[in-house]
Amino acid sequence: MRLTAFTDYGLRVLMRLADEPDRTITTEEIAEEHGISRNHLVKVVRDLAEAGFVQTRRGGGGGMQLARPADGITIGEVVRWLEARHALVECFRADGGNCILNPGCRLKSRLRRAKEAFLADLDRSTLAECAGTTTSKPSRSSKRTRRTKVKEDC
C-alpha cells in the first residue's frame, strides 16, 4: 500500500512533536526542517488537530504540541485518519467508484483484507516507539535540513 504525501507529512509532524513533547513547535519550523511547503503543512496540521492528535495555538508564542501522549497514539489510527479520503482502489471509494468489474470481482475482498492487515500491523506501533529519531538539529540561522536516523523496527 502506498501512503500519500499528506500522510507522510502528518507522520513527520507527529514524530517531530513527540521528540519534544514539552515544547511548542511552529509549522514554519517543521516545514523548514523537512523541506515541505508551509502552506501544505498547514492543511496537514489542520487535519491532525481535527482528529485530536495535536493542539494548536495561534499568534505570538503559538505553535503546536501533541494533544495526547505519544504512547497513546498508534501509527495505524493516524494513517486511517489521514488516508480516509483516499481509496486504495477505485471500487473502495464511498460512491463505489467507476469499476466495471465490481459486480463479479473477486479481488476486492482480498484487497480489503490486505489493507486491514497492513493497518493492523501499524496499530501495533505507537508514535512514541517511532519518534526519538533526532540526531541533530540545525541552528536557527542554518538552512540545512535536520538530520535524522531511521529506527529500523518502528
Image (tube, grey):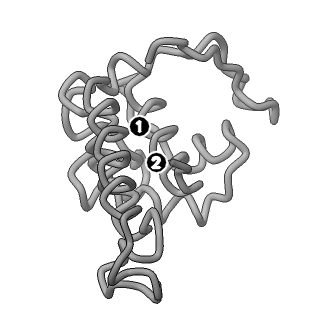
Direction from residue 37 to residue 144 in the image, left or right? right
Using the image, determine if residue 137 lies above or below residue 123: above
Q: Quadrant of the C terminus?
A: top left
Query: Which residue is disc 1 drawn over?
Result: 14
Tell me which residue sits at (37%, 58%) in the image: 58
User: Quick one: SS at disc 1?
Assistant: helix
The answer to whether one can see residue 148 in this image is yes
Tell me which residue sits at (47%, 88%) in the image: 100
Direction from residue 44 to residue 46 in the image, left or right? left
Q: Quadrant of residue 46?
A: bottom left
Direction from residue 18 to residue 70 in the image, left or right? left
- Of 77 and 38, the residue lying toward us: 77
Query: Which residue is disc 2 drawn over?
Result: 10
Residue 53 placement (x, y as % from top left):
26, 45
- Distance Cα–Cα, label 2 vs label 1: 6 Å
Residue 122 placement (x, y as % from top left):
34, 32
Q: Quadrant of residue 146?
A: top right
The answer to whether one can see residue 57 in this image is no
Tag of residue 92: none
Using the image, determine if residue 111 lies above or below residue 32: below
Using the image, determine if residue 38 lies above or below residue 54: below
- Of 113 and 30, the residue lying toward us: 113
Asked if the residue at tag 1 contacts the one at tag 2, i.e. Cβ–Cβ closer than 8 Å, the answer is: yes
Tell me which residue sits at (24%, 56%) in the image: 51
Bin the neighbour count of mark 2 within 10 Å (Cα to Cα): few under 14, some 14-19, many 20 and up.
Answer: many
Q: Amino acid at mark 2?
A: Gly
